[in-house]
Image (spheres, rainbow, N blue to C red):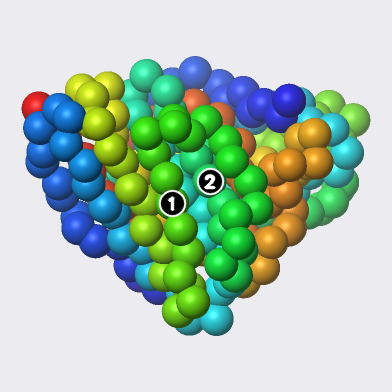
Amino acid sequence: DSGVTQTPKHLITATGQRVTLRCSPRSGDLSVYWYQQSLDQGLQFLIHYYNGEERAKGNILERFSAQQFPDLHSELNLSSLELGDSALYFCASSVASGVSYEQYFGPGTRLTVT
Amino acid sequence: GNSVTQMEGPVTLSEEAFLTINCTYTATGYPSLFWYVQYPGEGLQLLLKATKADDKGSNKGFEATYRKETTSFHLEKGSVQVSDSAVYFCALSGLAGGTSYGKLTFGQGTILTVHP
């Protein structure tokens, strides 16, 4: 158990809908990262928050947004869902924001868009 | 930008065989390098890391050495077990245009299956 929690574990929804994925980092960790894992794209970085502020964006679609709240949990919002958004979404946390800090991953949310 | 290339899999071995999974990278500056393992239906677990050239990361019998001259971070284990069957990801964390400090760039993953 990494100490990172994600809810829900599974999510099935229809095209055009909007969903929210939630992540609680390890106690004491200030950084939260979101990643998408799909068969064709592999593991892709989406976005990074540190202590409530956005620090970096990766291959994140404009239909997707995220935020980190004062209690440090984070939410990833996916809207106008398409079939191609079906994937595993992981969040990871680390104690700080930097090259050498290891990231601890949650169990993931499997999103299926039908 | 940063990139990681892993040897193509899948890799199938018998128990107690020697394991090598090759990983090479392209990055600016001095990245940190990681190996993560993903068991079926689970998230990624950090296996080992190295933060500077010639560092050797090790854990659970696995080891990898940060080779800056060959831009490589190959994963090795002297004697694999059935319980090592999983997907292994090489990753790096480094600067890329100054806007991705700390994000991980992953290789495509290598599926390892160990038979008794």
Please state, as top left, top right, bottom left or bottom right, where the N terminus of chain B lies in the image.
Answer: top right
A1 left or right, relative to B67: left
Image position, residue B115 (x, y; %):
28, 36
Instruction: Check disc 2 and report its element: helix, strand or loop.
Output: strand
Provide the chain ID for the residue under circle 2: A
In the rendered image, residues at marks 1 and 2 fall on the same chain: yes
Q: Along the polypeptide, which appears first: circle 1 or circle 2?
A: 2
Say if mark 1 contacts mark 2, CB within 8 Å.
yes
Discs 1/2, front: 1
Q: Amino acid at mark 1?
A: Ala
Give the residue at x 72% y 49%.
B101
Asked if residue B14 is positioned above or below residue A50 in the image, the reply reads above
Amino acid residing under circle 2: Ile
Q: Which residue is mark 2?
A: A47
The residue where tag 1 is placed is A66
**Crowding near the residue tagged with mark 2, few <14, some 14–19, many ≥20 C-alpha atoms within 10 Å:** many
Q: Tell which subunit mark 1 falls on.
A: A
- Residue B91 vs residue A22, the one in the foreground: A22
